Each structure stands twice: as structure tokens, then as C-alpha cells.
Amino acid sequence: MKKIFLLLNFIFAVINVYAQYPQFMLKNGNFFEYRRNQISNNELKRYQKLFGDQYKRNYDVLSYDLKLDWTEALSSEPMKYSFSGKNNITLVFTEPSVNQIELDARNLDINKIILNNRETINYNYNNDILKINLDNSYQLGDTLSVIIDYKFTGRDTVGFYLFPKNMAVGYGPTGEMVYTEERIAYTMSEPEDARYWMPCNDRPNDKARSSIKIKVPKDYTAVSNGLLVSKTEDNETITYHWADTALISTYLMAVAASKFVSYNEWYKDPRNPNDSIELVYYVWEKDLENEKTDWTVYNAKNAFKPTSFIIDLYSQKYILYPFRKYGQVAIQPFYFGGMEHQTITFVNRSWLRGRSQSGIAHELAHHWIGNLVTCEDWQNIWFNEGGATWSEAIWTEGWGGYQWYLEYMNSVGDQYRDRKSLMKFPIYNIPTNYIFSYPYSLLVYNKASWIYHQLRIMLGDEVFFVALRKLLIKYAFSNINLEKFQQHFEEEVPKPPIPFNIFFNQWLKTGGHPIYNISAQTYFDEMKNKYITNIYVKQTQTGENVNPLFVTYLPIVLFNSDNIVENFVINNQPEQSFTLETEFIPDSIFIDTRKVLAESNRAKVNFLTSINEKNSQFISVFPTITNPNSYININFNKFGNNSIIQLYNSLGELVQEFQNQNEFFNLYIGNLTVGVYYLRIYCDNKIFSQKIIIQ
């Protein structure tokens, strides 16, 4: 009674507090500026021209030393979409005899290029790839300094965004028109837009150190990755210098500038009180705080309040927060919910209304899964986004418990399962043009999150989280792909319930998910004094590119009004039967689709009446213990002569079936091996069962 009581209590709790769910979990909850994982149709066109080939170039960037002058962009009237920049790139050659390098640069005016302190004009630029011929042949391990003086001219505003003060951006939740409070400029680089605002090797697999100086008008604040090294002022401008020693991919580099106010707090790790992480937030002054804490107003201090708790939670579940600072900047307009720029997340201003804690948790999680360890290429973006989406459920578990974790993952799964058109697309090989566009993003974010979730369920918390922590340490400040991910788990968990090559191939490289049809029948075993339930499972998913068989760690739940029990089985056949024992008579059965990414019916359990003394007036079986090459005699005692006779082995597999029209039937068992069998007889709308032992 206790188990079902707890289950019902949880169901009622979900109903009572559903209104408190994060915005993401409300299926019909569209919120002003928050378009989770979606790109508008107007913006989708620009993504279709991105994603160059992912081959590694003949060098590795060691550092970017970038200088930007945004003074004119932030002060000119009328507003000018332009700025000047200078990028000093230090690289090391990874191949011998190199006499030319390529850099990504799109729609930038190149003023000057200096190689090792000597200016060169020996380069070719086609507004996409900058090819520089070197002054001599460089060998493996040689380094080179490349300084590129350039100007962004606003021919294409991708990568760099500039918006004026008092620009209407849409309607708020109470119907009011919302405007930008100040002029604002910022960069947005994921997936390959860094090339629009700085020359670079714009690929996630080339991490480097970064140092960024931004000159802005004196009443502006400029923020970027890492720590603030210095501020240098003159009469009209101020230059902010941000830098970090942690390696970073170009898509995670970012700059934002506006008339921000800031406030900070400190996260102190209770396990190491001397280790303090500064948490700093940048918002417009009007948005800093408000007496109201509901979703109708901007209130940064209320909205960012969960940040310290989330860092502490992830530091316990994963490893200690791996960077020296964490910041959040409210941006408007912003075409995404948030962007996890390393140490300085940009969030949609609408998040300041306080209903996007799951978004804050998502972007923070990226600092472990995505920033510390980064996908090697965009085919492996599932690692970043699936891991961060799953981490939202970990955050939910942190404040609500394990049942809330399961409900959160179920909601994430439902958003994917509800889009039947996605069945034919694998996570790993969807067209790169659509990785971040809806509904394909439901594969990269939602379905991919179930990679982590199902691994946790299958391996158990102790094994899974230890393996995950070791992975984060092993690949810290470097890159990962599917092969490395799989190999790591194979090394850490040598005998998983499902082989990892099968697990990762079916969930990442093939389309769809299992759709089950289940049925069950129960009888009482007098020798065991238990109820034996034979469960029949069939996978029915079909369609283009859909995997016809998923090998699953399948949670089967049997229950009645007073009891509930869960068992895990390995489903590795399209049609399969399982035998489970319970202390009670189950009346229903279901597959817990909160723990396996699947769809399934719920089925009533048919109870089979045992052929005991009470029922011997209707039907009798003799002998019940016999030898091979003998007969089982069935006497229907004039009860009926239209019956179906089935014999099952101990695995619940049907081995013989006959139709009978007579009052007597002799069942020959000469072709059966020694073992335990179960006789099932359907007669006059009744079902009878009898255990048979062949010895």
C-alpha cells in the first residue's frame, strides 16, 4: 500500500503545483521574447550559407589578441553599423613545409596584414576565406604571429548586432509595448558567425586563449570573456580589457556593450571555502530590481537569484565549476533564449521577468558540457545541447527530487515524441543547415538529452556519474566526438546491460524510437506461492529510416489498486515475452516512458484460473509431472469441446498450440526437453492454466 500511496501523492503534487513549472515545461507556454531553440523563418536563410567543411587546417591557434573600437557604432547619429578591429593571432604549425594559411573572414575590409612584424601584401581575400602566402616555408612546431587590421562595414549585420535606444521590440505579457532602454551592441557567433566580426579559424575544434580590448564611449560598459584586466580612460572613451587563460572556441567568444549597471555576488564552495567564484550581472538600470517578483516585470536580482544554487548543484553532480568567473548579460532584442558564451552568458531580457530558471540552468550547464568539453564539430553538437537540456532536469531534481526529474525528462521527451515527422531523422546526421532550427532542434536538444538520461537509468547513478566526471576531467579544455564518448564509457563500464556500440548507434545514428504494443496474462503458481505474469512485448515502429529494432533497458511496471512494482528487462527482439513474479495479482501493466524514450499502450492483465481442486469439475490434466516421450491427458468433463490449447516454456515462449473439438485431448510431449512448462487452455470464455514438469 505504501508504494502506490507515494505514487498517488506525487501525482496529486504534480497537479497542484503544475502552474509553478518552468516556462519550458508548459506545452502551450509561449512567452514574449523567449523562443527556445528556435530560429525564425527570416533568420533561417542566413544559416543555410554557414557550416564550412570541418577538416583541420595546417595550424593550431594558440591565442587571439583582439582590439575593437566600437566608439563610432555606439555614439554616431545617425547610427553607423561599423567598427574597426585588429586581431593578433599567434599560431603553431601542425604540418611540415607550410607556405600558405587560410583564415575565416566574411564581409570584412582588410586594411593591413603583418606577419612576424613584417607587412605583407601577398594574400587573397574573397569575402569568405582569407588566404595568406607566407614569406618562407614553416616547419612542424614553428610559430607565427599574424596581425590583421580590418574594418566591419555593416554590409551584413550577422555576427555583430547594433540596435538604437527606444526601439520597439514587441508586446510584453500584460500587453504593453516594450522598447530598448539604451543603445546596445553585441556579438553572437554560434555556430560559425565569429568570422563576421573578426578574422579567425572559426571552428569549434581549435581552442585558443583570448584577450579582448573594447573601446567604447565613456558612459558605456563593455563586457567579454574572462576577467577584467584593466580599464583605460581618456576624455571621451574608455577601453575595457578582458582576458582569460582558459582555452576557448571562437563561437564562445563574445562582446556586449551598452549603458549597463552591474552587481555581483560570490559563490563559495562549502567543500573549499577559500575557492570563491565571482558572479557578476549586467542589466539596464530600470531592470535591476523591483518590488514585484512575478513574471510581469523585469527584476534582475530576483531572476538571477538561483544562479549560485545551480552552480553548487552542478559542482556536486559533475566537477567543481571550471572557470574563474561567471557572468550574465541581459540582451534585447535577442533572437535566442540564451547563449553560453564562456564565463559571460547572454540572456534574453525577458528572462529577467523570472520565469526562465530552466534557461539559466541550461546555459550554466554548458560551462561543463559544451565549454569545458566542446563538441569537435557540428555533427557532434548533440553532446553540448543534449547534455545541457538533460542538466535542466538535474537542476529540477536538485530542488524537487527524483520524481520531478523524471517528469521533466518526460516533458522534454513529449515535445520530441509529439513531432512524428522527426521519426525519420537521426540526431547525428541531420542537415547541418537545420541543426538550430525548429523542429529539428528537438533532435539536437530534446532527443539528445535522453542519451544522458537513458545512460543514467541503465548504469545507475554511482556508475554513470563517476564515468561522466572522469570524462569531463579527461577532455577538459579540449574537444570530443561520438567515438571518443563511446570509447570512454566502454573503458569505464566494461559490461553494460546493453553494449555501447548498439546503444549509441541506435539512438544517434538511426531515426525514430520504439513504439510498443504490450499485453500480459497472470496465473498463480502454488509451488512458489507467487503470481506469475507472462508479458508480451512487440515493437511496431515503421517508416523511412526508422530503426525497426531498438535494444532497450525496458522498465515494466505491474500494479493494482494497492501495489506497484517495477522490473527492468532487456528487450532485444522485435517480439519478445518476459516472465515476472509478484506477491500480488496485477491488474494492469505499462512501460514507464519516463525512463525509456518510447511510446506504449497500457494494458489490462488477464488472470488465468489455475486447474486446482475447485476447477476440477470443469477440466482436469494428468499427469502434471512426467517424462519425455509421453502424453499429457486433458479431460474437459463435458464442460465444453471447443478449446485452444497452448504450451509455453519457462521463458514464456509458445512452443505448441492446438485447436480441440473433443471432450478429451492427448498432448504429445515427445519433442520437448526436460524443464518447466505452462499449459494454458482457453475454453468457453474462460482461461485455465497448469504447470507441467518434464523430468
Image (cartoon, rainbow, N blue to C red):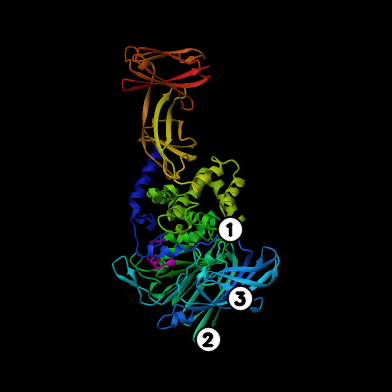
For marks 2 and 1 on the same chain, the one whose residue lies earlier in the sequence: 2
Would you place residue 342 above or below residue 672 in this image? below
Q: Residues within 10 Å of mark 3 (few under 14, many from 20)?
A: many
Element type at mark 3: strand
For marks 2 and 3 on the same chain, the one whose residue lies earlier in the sequence: 3
Q: Which residue is mark 2?
A: 234
Question: How many numbered discs?
Answer: 3
For residue 116, side relative to residue 526 (left or right): right
Q: Is residue 467 visible?
A: yes
Q: Position of residue 349 (x, y in %)?
A: 40, 68
> What label does residue 217 carry, if any?
none
Would you place residue 483 above or below residue 160 in this image? above
On-image quarter of the N terminus = top left
Q: Amino acid at mark 1?
A: Asn
**Tag nearer the camera, 2 or 3:** 3
> What label does residue 479 carry, if any?
1
Q: Which residue is mark 3?
A: 147
Q: Nearer the viewer, residue 230 or 159?
A: 159
Q: Is residue 354 visible?
A: no
